[in-house]
């Protein structure tokens, strides 16, 4: 099945993972996505560790490889007039441009939304930045950790109450900003079908962070109390991670018909859990060390996959705390056909995560190509599609435009 | 229903609970779809979950929870109907004829037991799009397992990599996966509508929390195949230092500072008033700063602890240094930036007059072509009559019959326990 977005062309002009991931979401649904990188250096994430085989190399960064699947790549210096001209020519036939420059930078370069839109009124421009296009912090510098902090997530969500704030690994605010951007793009494409006009979408990673907990703002405005980190502290049955024979697990009181300690006492063959002091959530928190001393040795006798199978059979709900290695080797994901293999000339064949959904039983993730090498498609796109001659391409190369 | 929304004319029937799926269908509701939340009178957990004003549920608690405004029933309609009753099932199937999308978050098998599986619904309406949002999907050995957002946070690899430096793994969040999955639900449904505009065909979407989670940790998945393991570093970074959260003046106040280059380090030194320690050789280069980051963090923390975090972050930003205050919910409600951007939405819910107007987080994106706002929040069964007469074509006598037979409800059962 050709991807749902296979008739669309996306230009990506981004510097941070949020923009790259947003464009990837579109590329993974089949959109012809052209990543435009600065000549010579390319996307900053090409140079950030870790690298496949530990070899620092612009085509071996795991972040770059993971966030740029199914894209083609060209180099273009849009700081130079000729580079901007070529970008504008590409934008004339594009449906979507994803960019993450600081606000006003595109205007300074002469390729603001108004210019792009005059050349191509159907164009959807999506700008993903840390603080958005306007407002007092618009010009502030950010990164994922700053987004977690300024978005209220760092203070309230992940860490322990008695420790400093601590955040979520792996740049999840960038990911969340990107997912919001992709939703906004699809809504804009549906609107374009009605109006034949594009739009300029403003996505803020700080705001994406604020919206991430199921409640941050309104719990405060309803109760006057600030949500505070530490929700899993001392919470043996509903939060902590507990060791198993070959990993860790986190328990829940779900699926126990309102009698969690009876269900778990029976499953773990540990009658001590029936002690009335553990009967309520408050009691379990108060006596969490005693509870931990009873539960932990029992769980430590199980392997992860056995524990998953047997709790599932009894309707108990647990979560295996899987290492990325265990995720890669997951029999469940293998049977579903979740991973997609892409063979990269530098990084070799690797299994890449799918999109998270299957359509009519088929993995919805396109498997067209791995991340592009720097300037890999310059000749194909600038020569073949824009019609530049090899001589012209040579001149542009000498002038460091491509 | 939101007027002049891009999805006007699109109808969604949703059998949804908890957070992920209601969050996902909430986007469609905000964009103008007619999202009908079909609620069971026997599963009112979401309406019990709060938050309630001052932490106390009122007499009409079922319409008062803040979560209903934030995502549960905002811009949606509510049909409180027992679909396991033959009368309720009949109505549901009638509504399917006039519906574009049916979504659920039951475990695999439940929709089939109700007679609402994709094949049955598409026999009634070939253009129907169905989406089932589950923990592990309709296939595979774990398909029957239940979940919480936290257990998927664990299973996808995110929790394992999250934790204080040198400490144990910790769940990243109790509900980040719900949120992330909700965004993926909205994306998948909008893709499906876009595709159907071309092909006229419906489709069946099997969307999972586990796989959405794994798709968000791609770099670690590639690294694992290459034998690379990531250490837990708390707020520290793989190669940047300083990059952490530092104490500020006051109780439980903190500031984040990030330095990515020598130039930024020089600017930070000046901002600190060029203390002698900052010029020591052990902090002279990117590599040395990273290797000596614990000492660096401690010294930097001594400096930050003498400053107000909000003022200091503003000052550092003016000096082109990446910094941010560690804001609380209260700070955010009073934040001038969010205020200037119109991010926070105040809404007085007419269905819960006791609650009065409250402030909510808005959407993290603006599109002048698709403006969004809260226009209504559906009380329990508030739209029963309108939906049953307007869409299912029932007479008022039919509707009264359904009420008398215990199929539809405008309030919880008399013996329902309050939250």
Image (tube, rainbow, N blue to C red):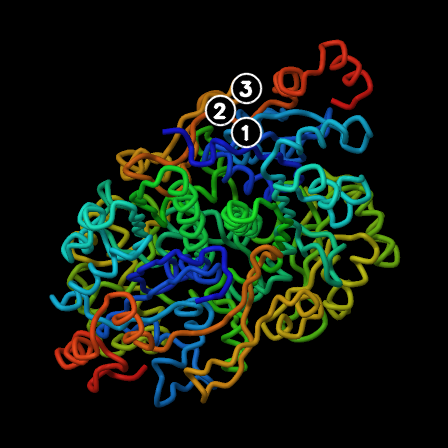
Q: Chain of mark 3?
A: A
Identify the residue under disc 1.
Answer: A71
Q: Is residue B193 above or below residue A338?
A: below
**Could you tell which of marks 1 and 3 lies nearer the N-terminus?**
1
| Left-right relation of A358 to B233 | left
Q: Secondary structure at mark 2?
A: loop
Q: Nearer the viewer, mark 1 or mark 3?
A: 1
Identify the residue under disc 3.
Answer: A346
Label 1 in the same subunit as label 3: yes
Q: Is residue B73 above or below residue B287?
A: below
Q: Chain of mark 2?
A: A
Residue B232 showing in the rendered view: no
The answer to whether marks 2 and 3 mark residues whose Cβ atoms lie closer than 8 Å is no
The answer to whether marks 1 and 2 mark residues whose Cβ atoms lie closer than 8 Å is yes
Identify the residue under disc 2.
Answer: A369
Split into 4 quadrants, where in the image is the C terminus of chain A?
top right
Along the viewing direction, whichever of B237 and A390 lies nearer the viewer: A390
Q: Choose top left, top right, bottom left or bottom right for residue B410.
A: bottom left
Split into 4 quadrants, where in the image is the N terminus of chain A?
top left
Along the viewing direction, whichever of A109 and A226 lies nearer the viewer: A109
Residue A369 image offset from top left, x and y in percent: 49, 24
């Amino acid at each position: 099945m050709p991807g749902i977005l296979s008739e669309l062309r996306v230009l990506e002009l981004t510097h941070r993972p949020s923009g790259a991931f947003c464009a990837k979401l579109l590329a993974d649904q089949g959109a012809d996505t052209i990543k435009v990188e600065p000549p010579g250096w390319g996307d900053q994430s090409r140079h950030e560790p870790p690298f496949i085989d530990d070899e620092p190399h612009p085509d071996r960064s795991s972040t770059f490889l993971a966030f740029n699947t199914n894209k083609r790549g060209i180099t273009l210096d849009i700081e130079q007039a000729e580079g901007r001209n070529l970008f504008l020519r590409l934008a004339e036939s594009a449906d979507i441009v994803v960019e993450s420059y600081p606000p006003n930078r595109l205007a300074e370069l002469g390729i603001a939304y108004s210019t792009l839109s005059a050349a191509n009124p159907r164009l959807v421009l999506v700008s993903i930045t840390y603080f958005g296009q306007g407002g007092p912090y618009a010009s502030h510098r950010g990164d994922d950790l700053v987004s977690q902090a300024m978005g209220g997530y760092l203070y309230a969500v992940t860490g322990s109450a008695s420790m400093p704030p601590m955040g979520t690994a792996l740049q999840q605010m960038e990911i969340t900003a990107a997912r919001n951007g992709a939703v906004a793009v699809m809504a804009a494409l549906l609107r374009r079908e009605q109006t034949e006009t594009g739009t300029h979408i403003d996505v803020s990673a700080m705001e994406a962070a604020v919206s991430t907990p199921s409640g941050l703002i309104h719990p405060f405005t309803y109760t006057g109390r600030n949500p505070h980190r530490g929700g899993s502290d001392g919470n043996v049955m509903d939060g902590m991670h507990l060791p198993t024979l070959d990993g860790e697990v986190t328990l829940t009181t779900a699926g126990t018909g309102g009698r969690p300690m009876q269900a778990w006492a029976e499953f773990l063959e540990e009658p001590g859990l029936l002690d009335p002091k553990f009967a309520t959530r408050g009691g379990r928190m108060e006596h969490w060390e005693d509870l931990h001393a009873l539960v932990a040795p029992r769980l430590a006798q199980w392997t992860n996959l056995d524990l998953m199978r047997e709790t599932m059979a009894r309707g108990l709900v647990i979560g295996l705390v899987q290492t990325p290695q265990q995720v890669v080797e997951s029999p469940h994901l293998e049977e579903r056909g979740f991973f997609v293999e892409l063979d990269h000339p530098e990084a070799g064949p690797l299994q890449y995560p799918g999109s998270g959904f299957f359509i009519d039983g088929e993995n919805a993730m396109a498997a067209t190509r791995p991340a592009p090498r720097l300037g890999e498609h310059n000749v194909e796109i600038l020569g073949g599609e824009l019609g530049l001659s090899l001589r012209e391409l040579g001149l542009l190369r000498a002038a460091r435009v491509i | 229903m939101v007027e002049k929304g891009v999805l006007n004319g699109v109808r969604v029937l949703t059998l949804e609970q908890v957070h992920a799926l209601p969050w996902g269908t909430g986007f469609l509701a905000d964009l103008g779809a007619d999202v009908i939340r079909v609620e069971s009178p026997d599963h009112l957990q979401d309406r019990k979950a709060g938050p309630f004003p001052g932490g106390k549920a009122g007499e009409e608690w079922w319409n008062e929870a803040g979560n209903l405004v934030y995502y549960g029933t905002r811009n949606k309609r509510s049909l409180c109907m027992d679909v396991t009753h033959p009368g309720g099932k009949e109505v549901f199937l009638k509504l399917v004829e006039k519906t574009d999308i049916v979504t659920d978050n039951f475990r695999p098998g439940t929709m089939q037991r109700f007679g609402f599986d994709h094949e049955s619904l598409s026999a009634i309406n070939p253009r129907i799009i169905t989406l089932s949002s589950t923990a592990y999907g309709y296939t595979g050995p774990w398909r029957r397992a239940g979940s919480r957002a936290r257990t998927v946070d664990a299973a996808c690899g995110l929790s394992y990599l999250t934790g204080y430096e040198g400490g144990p793994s910790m769940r990243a969040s109790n509900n980040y996966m719900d949120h992330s999955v909700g965004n993926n639900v909205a994306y998948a449904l909008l893709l499906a509508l876009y595709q159907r505009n071309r092909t006229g065909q419906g489709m069946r979407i099997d969307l999972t929390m586990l796989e959405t989670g794994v798709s968000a940790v791609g770099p670690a998945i590639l690294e694992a195949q290459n034998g690379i393991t990531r250490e837990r570093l708390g707020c520290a970074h793989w190669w940047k230092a300083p990059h952490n959260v530092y104490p500020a003046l006051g109780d439980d106040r903190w500031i984040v500072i990030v330095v990515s280059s020598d130039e930024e380090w020089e600017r930070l030194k000046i901002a600190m008033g060029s203390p002698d320690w900052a010029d020591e050789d052990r902090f002279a280069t990117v590599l040395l700063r990273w290797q000596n980051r614990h000492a660096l963090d401690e010294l930097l923390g001594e400096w930050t602890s003498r400053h107000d975090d909000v003022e200091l972050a503003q000052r550092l930003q003016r000096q082109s240094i990446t910094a941010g205050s560690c804001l609380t919910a209260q700070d955010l409600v009073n934040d001038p930036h969010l205020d200037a951007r119109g991010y926070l939405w105040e809404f007085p819910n007419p269905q819960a007059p006791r609650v009065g107007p409250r402030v909510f987080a808005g959407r993290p994106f603006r599109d002048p072509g698709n403006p969004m706002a809260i226009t209504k929040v559906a009380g329990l069964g508030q739209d029963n009559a309108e939906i049953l007469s307007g869409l299912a074509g029932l007479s008022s006598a039919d509707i009264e019959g359904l009420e008398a037979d215990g199929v539809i409800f405008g309030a919880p059962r008399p013996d329902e326990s309050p939250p």
